Each structure stands twice: as structure tokens, then as C-alpha cells.
Amino acid sequence: MGIAVGMSGSGGLPETAAVLVVRRAVREWVAARGGRAPVVVGLSGGADSLALVAGAVAEAGPVTAVVVDHRLQDGSDAVARRAVAQALGLGCVDGLVLPVEVGRAGGVEAAARVARYAALESVRDGRPVLLGHTLDDQAETVLLGLARGSGGRSIQGMTAWKTPWGRPLLGVRRAQTVRMCADLGLTVWDDPHNSDPGYTRVRVRNEVLPLLEDVLGGGVAEALARTAGQLREDGAVLDMYAAELLRAARSERPEAQQSAAAPSGTGDTCPSTLSIEILATAPPALRRRAVRAWLTEQGISGLMNAHLQAIDELVRNWRGQGGVAVAGGGRAHRLVVAREHGTLTVRAQSRLDAT
């Protein structure tokens, strides 16, 4: 349960260069979403989220600031309360502190992110949630995606809007949010995790990007963010054509194959199957996107490029090889994409059978 911290109001903001940059970014985001409306802002107490709170109060509708207290550091509750107090001083209509339990699945950083997003979702009450990711965060995300080598989707970066998450500051540099907070006299919390070289993102931020900027003569962060935007535009077109391919692959299944695909219990095929013939004649980029979308519909996420390449081999270069394990279906079973009777299908396979 959240801890209510009260309500307050505030006057206007000084018209410094940094304040105007942040306000303009928020104003343009709000206009693109249809105009002023109530929003939730995820607040950490750092410069990016504090600047976003101030910009949202000035340019969006009523703002509720929400601090998720991960309780991973001593004194985190005091940090959270101080952040909310500053948000209320900036004019937020309300503020909450949400203590959460952080698991360990996927590492502390990933588990904290899962807990944070779940907490924000639990209190948004239909409102969009604004997050303080900046152009610098975008550049780091693109570099990390490039290192994974998982294809164009992994280097598209973050989007300014994906229901219910909004990121108005993706065109704003981190230095500008820091300057804005200084202009407003705000006390910024520097998370020790943001300087811990044990985190890959921290090393990318503090070592890799500065080196690239130095070697390549500057402008690297902007170039990476610009590339991500172009790839998202290209990706939207490819996704549209992939959706058409997915519909065609479903509709072209022979009647006998459709009836064979009906499930009759654990270990049987999933009711959704795709025509190998239709998939095989499509360009690889569309085929892999269609397969990814098909599996996502069935609750299978976290696919790696290796999964999609192996499934593609089932379609275009089948030599009698077995199916591709794509997810855990529980302790006793795993989910496997297989080629059967001219179709791609998903089966729940016994782990004992797989050994």
C-alpha cells in the first residue's frame, strides 16, 4: 500500500534555458497525446525525474508523483519522502511512496525494474505514467542493444509512448535536467548504483560513451538516438506487413491440418498453427517478425535471435531436425516450436522426453 504524503501547490517556473528545453519537450509530448490530462510521474529523486515533475506540472494536467522505494539501500525511505516533498512543492496534486519487495530473478537490476513497473501500474488508475528517460539513456540503450546483436528491434531504443508508459524527455540531454534542478534549487539524489561499475550500463555511461564522443568528435549520443528513431519508423512499416503475412499464414492452412491442430490435452499442439508454404515464400525479415508476433500472442516472450534463427531453419532449411524450445511451460513441461504436416505449431513437451 502506498504512503500518502499530502498535497501542495506552486507558482510558475523561472524561464532559464534548461527549464524552457524541458517544458517544450513535455508540451510537445502532451500535445501529441491529445492535450492536457492527469498524469502520474515515476519519481526517483534524481535530476531527470525531478525535472520531469516540474515540466509536467507546468505543461500537463494534474500530476501525481509516485516514488517506488525498492528498499535496497539504507535510508531509502527518507530519500523517497524527500523526493515527494519536493514534488509537492513543485505543484503536484498528490504524492505517494510505494515500498516494494525486489526479487532476484534475472539479477537485482532486472528484478527492481519489474517491481517498479508493477507498482506504478497498480496506482495509475487509467492515467499515463511518465518516466524520466533522457536522450543519454536512449543512447545507452541503443549501444547495449547493439552489443547483444539481436537485430534491428533491439536497437530501436525506447519509444516516447507505449501504453501506459510515456517518455517526454527522450530528446533532452541529462545535463539539461541537472541544470534545471540547479536553477530551481532542488536537492537531487545521486543513486550510488548509478556509479557502480558492476553494472554494464554504468560502464557504458561513464566509460564507453565518453570514449566514443572523444574519438568520433562528439555528437555520438544524438546520432544513436536519431538512429533509434529511424529504426522505429522502419520497424512500424515492417510490423504492418508482418501482420498481413501472419493473417495469410493462418488462413492458408489446409482443413486437415487445422483439425489436426486442435488441442486434446497436455503435450498436444497449440490451436494456432502457421502454413510453412506461406512463410517460406516471404522475405526473412517479415517471416521472423510474423513468427515473433505469433508466439507473443501465445504468451511466449523473451525470444532471442537464436530462437528465431532456429525456427527459420524449420521453415526454409528443414532436414528433419527437431523442434525449438522457446519457453518453460512449468516444471514438468517446456514449450517447443515444431514443424508438423506442413505447419509450424507449438507443443508442450515433457522435460523427461527432452532428456
Image (cartoon, rainbow, N blue to C red):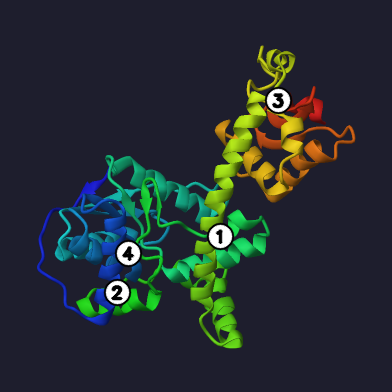
Quadrant of residue 27 in the image? bottom left
Image position, residue 40 (x, y; %):
27, 51
Figure check: 263 above or below 290 = above
- In this view, the mark in front (2 or 4): 2
Q: Nearer the viewer, residue 180 or 161?
A: 161
Q: Quadrant of the C terminus?
A: top right
Query: As drawn, is 248 to the left or to the right of 38?
Result: right
Residue 85 seen anywhere in this rendered image of the structure: no
Can you tell which mark lies on residue 21? 2
Query: Disc 1 and disc 2: Cα gap in Å?
Result: 25 Å
Quadrant of residue 291 in the image? top right
Query: As drawn, is 155 to the left or to the right of 103?
Result: right
The residue to which callout 3 is attached is 347
The residue to which callout 1 is attached is 231
Image position, residue 6 (x, y; %):
14, 53
Report if the CB atoms under discs 2 and 4 are less than 8 Å apart. Answer: no
Which comes sooner in the sequence, label 4 or label 3? 4
Image position, residue 34 (x, y; %):
26, 51
Which comes sooner in the sequence, label 4 or label 1? 4
